[in-house]
Amino acid sequence: MAALIPVAPGVGLDPACIEVRFVRASGPGGQNVNKVSTAVELSCDLARSGLSAEVITRAVALAGSRATLDLRILISAQRFRTQQMNRDDAMARLLELLARACVRPKRRIATRPTAGSRERRLSDKKAQGSIKRNRSGGRSSNDD
């Protein structure tokens, strides 16, 4: 078995779950663009990744449209002109996404506004209302 790819402290990714395909890149590149497949399509099968269900759930949410229904994350990279640089770029983006998924979000503790803040809010609303009421300077045509 190959060594796990470190994602976060104490969390590793099984390299067997990663597939890399090279395809032709779009965009500028001169004659080279039609001959060499430098763009990378990286696919990571989260079901075989060895990550916890909690991390997988957060990773799918963070991936958004890059995640498929069968728990795969698809990343395409064509920023560079060489296969190796694009492969490294795609891998770095995958590991960054998985590292963010490993961070458990802090639970929000519900709080109530203080009595003083409620009082200030209401007095500010009254003051704003009186400013608007006094703005017309008299009766408007809608008061009839």
Image (cartoon, rainbow, N blue to C red):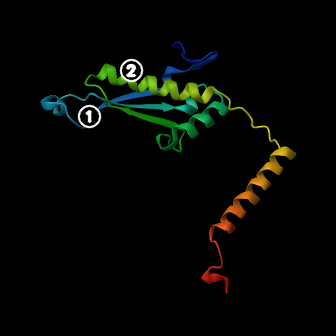
Q: Residue at x 62, y 37 (%)?
A: 57
Q: Residues within 10 Å of mark 1 (few under 14, many from 20)?
A: many
Q: Are marks 1 and 2 in contact (CB under 8 Å)?
A: no
The picture quadrant where one finds residue 136 is: bottom right
Residue 105: image location, x then y, percent: 68, 32
Q: Residue at x 38, y 34 (%)?
A: 76
Rendered location of residue 135, percent (x, y)? 63, 67
Residue holding disc 1 = 25
Crowd class of label 2 (few under 14; some 14 to 19; many from 20; radius 10 Å): few
What amino acid does circle 2 point to?
Asp
Calculate the distance from the C-alpha at mark 1 to the C-alpha at mark 2.
Answer: 16 Å
Is 55 situated above or below 129? above
Quadrant of the frame with the C terminus? bottom right
Residue furthest toward the front?
137
**Percent from the top left, x then y, of residue 56?**
61, 33
Front-lying residue, 42 or 118: 118
Image side of residue 125 versus residue 93, left or right? right
* Numbered tag placed on residue 88 in the rendering: 2
Residue found at the far bottom of this picture = 144
Q: Residue furthest left?
A: 31
Give the residue type at disc 1: Ala
Q: Is residue 13 visible?
A: yes
Secondary structure under tag 2 reads helix
User: Looking at the picture, does residue 120 appear above or below residue 54?
Assistant: below
Q: Which label is found at residue 81?
A: none
Judge by depth and name the residue closer to the eye, 75 or 16: 75
Q: Earlier in the sequence, mark 1 or mark 2?
A: 1
Please name the residue shown 55% across and 32% down the image. Answer: 46
